[in-house]
Image (spheres, coloured by chain):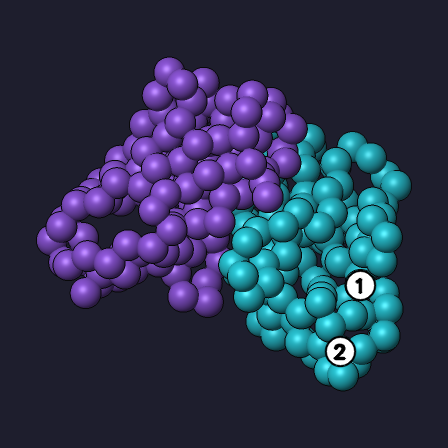
Chain colours: A cyan, B purple
Amino acid sequence: AQTVTQSQPEMSVQEAETVTLSCTYDTSESDYYLFWYKQPPSRQMILVIRQEAYKQQNATENRFSVNFQKAAKSFSLKISDSQLGDAAMYFCAYGDRDDKIIFGKGTRLHILP
Amino acid sequence: DSGVTQTPKHLITATGQRVTLRCSPRSGDLSVYWYQQSLDQGLQFLIQYYNGEERAKGNILERFSAQQFPDLHSELNLSSLELGDSALYFCASSVVSGSGELFFGEGSRLTVL
C-alpha cells in the first residue's frame, strides 16, 4: 500500500525567507502524481502545486517549487519569499492512476513577522 | 470557490444517532471522494465514487456508507455515531479519472456529543 510521510509536524520561518517542507512516499507504481495542498485556518483545502511522476522537470508555481527525487521517493516543497498568508497546514499527497489520493499527516507552517 | 458544495456546514448530534452529509461536485466532475479529518490530523481517505460506482475504498468504518446518485451528487451516511466520529468531513471531486487533481468542498463539521 502507498504511504506518505511528512516528518516535520511544525516549522517556522521568518517572513521573506525561504523554507523547505519535506515529504517522502512509498509506492511500487511508476506512474503517479504528487501534490502539495495548503489548508489555512479557514480549513479550505487549496492545491498549491502538482507534479506528474513521469516528468523529470520540477514543477513551479510562482514562489512555490518542488524538488522531486523519484528514485529516492522524495517530494519537498520550497516556499520562497515567505509571506504571512503562507501560514497554514501543508499536506503532501500521492495520487495513482486509479484516482486514489492519500495524504500525509501535514506540516504546520508558522510565518514569523 | 472550488465549485464543490457540501451541506450541512455544521452538525451537532448525539451518540448513537445517524446523520447524512451531502456533496454536490463541480459541474462535469464524475469522481467524488470523501475524506475524514479529525482534530489537527491529516485527511483519511474514506471512499471514492466514479460516475455512480464505487471505485476505491479506504479506511471507512462499517457504520459508514456512501453512494453517488445519477445526478452525480453523493451522500455519506454515518450511523451509530460515537464521540470519536467528531471530525471535519470533506468531499472532493475531480474532472476525469486519472487526473489526480481534487477540488475540495468547505467540509462538514460534525460534532458528536
Of A108 and B71, nearer the camera is B71
Does residue A54 sit above or below B110 in this rendering?
A: above
In the displayed structure, does residue B49 sit left or right of residue A106? left
Question: Percent position (x, y) of residue A81?
Answer: 86, 68
* 3D distance between C-alphas at marks 1 and 2: 10 Å
Q: Residue at x 40, y 18 (%)?
A: B71
Location of residue B54 by image quarter:
top left
Q: Residue at x 85, y 75 (%)?
A: A17
Q: Residue at x 47, y 53 (%)?
A: B43
Q: In this orientation, does residue B2 appear? A: yes
Please state which amino acid type lies under the numbered disc 2.
Answer: Val
Q: Secondary structure at mark 2?
A: strand
Task: Please name the residue that numbered disc 2 is placed on.
Answer: A13
Location of residue B66 by image quarter:
top left
Location of residue A31 by image quarter:
top right
Check the picture and name the quadrant holding the C terminus of chain A: bottom right
Does residue A86 sit above or below A65 in this rendering?
A: below
In the displayed structure, does residue A37 sit left or right of residue A52? left
Q: Secondary structure at mark 1?
A: strand
Of A25 and B23, nearer the camera is B23
Q: Residues within 10 Å of mark 2 (few under 14, many from 20)?
A: some
Tag on residue B49? Answer: none
Chain of the residue under the numbered disc 1 shown in the image: A
Question: Percent position (x, y) of residue B73?
Answer: 40, 27
Along the polypeptide, which appears first: circle 1 or circle 2? 2
Question: Percent position (x, y) of residue A110?
Answer: 67, 76
Task: Please name the residue that numbered disc 1 is placed on.
Answer: A79
Please state which amino acid type lies under the numbered disc 1.
Answer: Ile
